[in-house]
Amino acid sequence: MPTSYQAELKRKTVSPEEAAATVKSGDWVDYGFGLGQPELFDRALAERVPRLERVRVRGCLAMTPRAAIEADPEGRHVNYYSWYFSGLERRMHDRGLCSHIPMNFGEAPDYYRRFVEVDVAVVRCAPMDEHGFFNFGPSVTYEKALTETAKTVIVETDASVPYVFGLECGVHIDDVDYVINAGASKLPELKNPAAGPIDRKVAELIAREIQDGACVQIGIGAMPNAVCELLTESSVKDLGVHTEMFVDSLVALYESGKVSGAHKAFNRYQMTYCFAAGSARMYEFLSRNPACFAGPVDYTNLPHHIMQNDKTVAICNAAQIDLTGQACSESAGLRQISGTGGQLQFIRGAYASRGGKAFLCLASTYEREGRRASRIVARIDDSNIITTPRTDVMYVVTEYGIVNLKGKSVPERARALIGLAHPDFREELERQAREYRLIGRTIF
């Protein structure tokens, strides 16, 4: 490592308390994304919270509790804003300590470069390499745009962060104001719920639609990951991967020999992603692995990039779908559950891909407070947020079947979706469909 980089690193290295002292009342402080969110800085800022006013912390998919927010349980000094809720952020939202920022995830770098104010950016990175770069690890997403636009840039280095290969994967010491040395910690892990019988049934229906040479996107959740598991055991071959989130099941798919990437239009022979969250084994797999390519989210998620790979397959979850095909995937009424994320952009990109297919999968029912209800409804629940418009929805899959809505009239859609509902709810759905004039008097 050149001595000039070493000298600059030494000069810029400060304690967490010194770094947190840069935050002033009224500042926008950005914690970045997922695994890239800071820990020591957050704890140091928590100590300063009572002496600050109107501090706004922005983040996304927090994987550990945010100490600065917990230090102010009534939200008098600091508030948190998130592009996409993790379970932790959802609970903060329920307590009135977190607000959602609507966004198509693939637009995030442009948001930072054009619209978003950042006074202090703090991101967790791998230690500085021999070229003076701090690698963002598996949280590339919008981190480069964040560090470009922030007035003050602070990196918290952690030797446990995997060093990833790709595009816009790091920030140079010359562009960093302060460095916190966090040593080596245990990175937070994310475990997908185990697939149940319904998940496996839905996965079977989707897996049959995936051809040799397809390029897959696998989202978070039991159903998409069950698809990956089935593909591992299938006869399909020469798959490619171009996804938003890298998940554990993709490691198994690659190690089974099903992934070659030979038919991809770009990043051939590599699995493309913008962030990862999963097990320690997966983080180890990603570290310095030439088979993997991490890029910013506008590289992975914008439809005109996704569509370049033939036979793109997007597999996403939905929470509720009405009989015209509108899909809600991020809220329960006014209660924000997650976010739009990349769903709409991957559905559009997959559809535009030559031979592409986009799937929205869901269990036909859910239970809440001892009451069972249908996820397929005649009309969207009041205040529920539509993530994917009916004009974009392609395949819908439940444990009762699969249907392609493209080209279907409203009556055809209604009948097809009633057929995917649980049998206990079909008669009522048909009655409501006629009441709302979704199905007319004609029988053809």
Image (cartoon, rainbow, N blue to C red):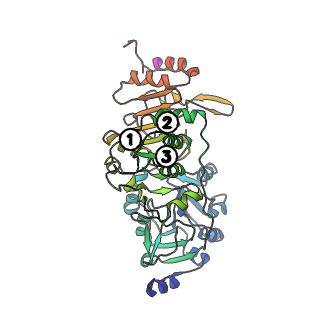
Q: Depth check: 169 or 329 in front?
A: 169
Q: Residues within 10 Å of mark 1 (few under 14, many from 20)?
A: some
Q: Would you say residue 189 sits in the magenta stretch?
A: no
Q: Which residue is mark 1?
A: 212
Query: Which image quarter is the C terminus in?
Result: top left
Going by the image, does 55 lie left or right of 348? right
Q: Is residue 56 above or below residue 417?
A: below
Measured as percent of width and height from the top left, residue 164 is found at: 46, 64
Residue contact at pointers 2 and 3, CB within 8 angstroms: no
Q: Which residue is mark 2?
A: 361
Q: Secondary structure at mark 1?
A: loop
Residue range in magenta is: 433-441
Q: Is residue 62 above or below residue 341?
A: below
Real-space CA distance between mark 1 and mark 2, rounded to the nearest whole angstrom: 21 Å
Q: Amino acid at mark 1?
A: Asp
Q: Which residue is mark 3?
A: 219
Task: Give the numbered dot on residue 272.
Answer: none
Give me the residue at 52% from left, 55% from top.
82
Measured as percent of width and height from the top left, residue 276 is found at: 51, 56
Q: Is residue 395 above or below residue 286?
A: above
